[in-house]
Image: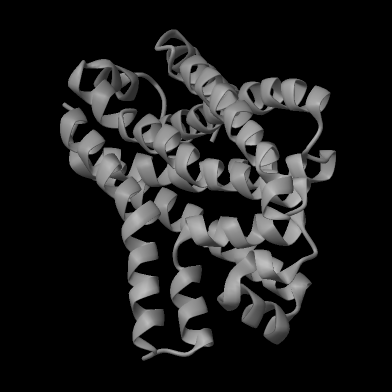
Amino acid sequence: MRVRILCLLSAREVRVSVRSRWTLVGAASFTVLAVAVAQLGMAGAERWGIATLDRTSAALLNLVLLFVPLLTLPLGASSFCGEAEDGTLPYLVAQPVTRGEVFAGKLVGLLSAMSLSLLIGFGAAAAVLGIQGGVSVGAFAALAGGAWLLGVVTTTLGVLLSTAARSRARALAAAVGAWLVLVFLCDFGVLALAASQTLGPGALFGISLANPLQATKTLSALAISERLEILGPVGVHAVRELGRPALAALLCGTLAAWTLLSSSAAFLLFRRENLA
């Protein structure tokens, strides 16, 4: 794989994302939502008797879990199938480049565009919230790191949907469906199992671990606060059984496995696709 070709293709993908205004709109939307959520978190802190830092950080973490997949899943889902429909992707493949270089270049470009969007959004939000206080530098950095890890996973998952759906409309519909499943249905399923008392804390943690959003939430919560109650009962059980370092390593491994499996499956589908 030639590095120069990879850089050219990834730079092209970033330019396409910026021209489509997806990156800038996502960054601006996250800035506005982050400031609004932080204001709400700080406003009710004294009334509820909760530390401002913990309340605001928890509110921003929930925003990250909702917003980042909603931004990155459609970004990845519209990439390959969208260019296949307008004829750009067959043109790229017809050039003296390998399909592996095309796939890697587009994926790196999408991840770079996602990183740029989060960097602008978090940077602008940090500038505004830093004046008002309420969120420490360490907690905000942990939130940004967790958002980036989640963005990597959901972007590659969107790419997998894009290569599997074969049309932009189906890929975007699948991206919205995946967002609903990850954000809402998985949580409802875990709550139903917990309410039925058919599974113990260990089994519930294993099921939660399979959801990249829950893995990111637990990993970020470990870095944000020393208070165990912020993790919930399943997270508290995992910390007591594994310890913080081992649990953090396990969660990072889960996110890495999601990324590797999604990108590998997407590449296999892309390599076999007939673009003539």
- Which residue is drawn at the image coordinates 44% and 35% (left, top)? 72
Q: Where is residue 8 in the image (x, y as percent from the top left)?
A: 54, 18
Task: Compare residues 11 and 126 and report the one nearer the observer.
Answer: 126
Say if 236 sits above or below 83 in the image: below
- The C terminus, quarter of image: top left
Please say which color scheme the image uses: one colour
Residue extending furthest toward the top: 19
Quarter occupied by residue 37: top right
Q: Nearer the viewer, residue 34 or 242?
A: 34
Is 52 left, or right, of 250 in this rendering? right
Residue in the image at 59% along x and 23% along y: 31
The residue that appears at 35% across and 19% down in the rendered structure is: 95
In this view, 21 is above or below 212:
above
Is residue 153 found left or right of 34 in the rendered image?
left
Residue 25, position in %: x, y? 47, 17
Question: Which residue corresponds to the image point at 73% horizontal and 55% vertical from the top-left?
Answer: 49
Q: Is residue 26 among the parts visible in the rendering?
A: yes
Residue at the farthest front position: 47
Coordinates of residue 172 in the picture (x, y in percent): 25, 34
Residue 121 in which image quadrant: top right
In the image, residue 134 lies at what x, y percent? 78, 38
Q: Which of 170 and 98 is in front in this view?
A: 170
The relative height of residue 126 versus residue 1 in the rendered view (above or below) is: above
Q: Toward the viewer: 130 or 211?
A: 130
Say if residue 115 shows up in the picture. Answer: no
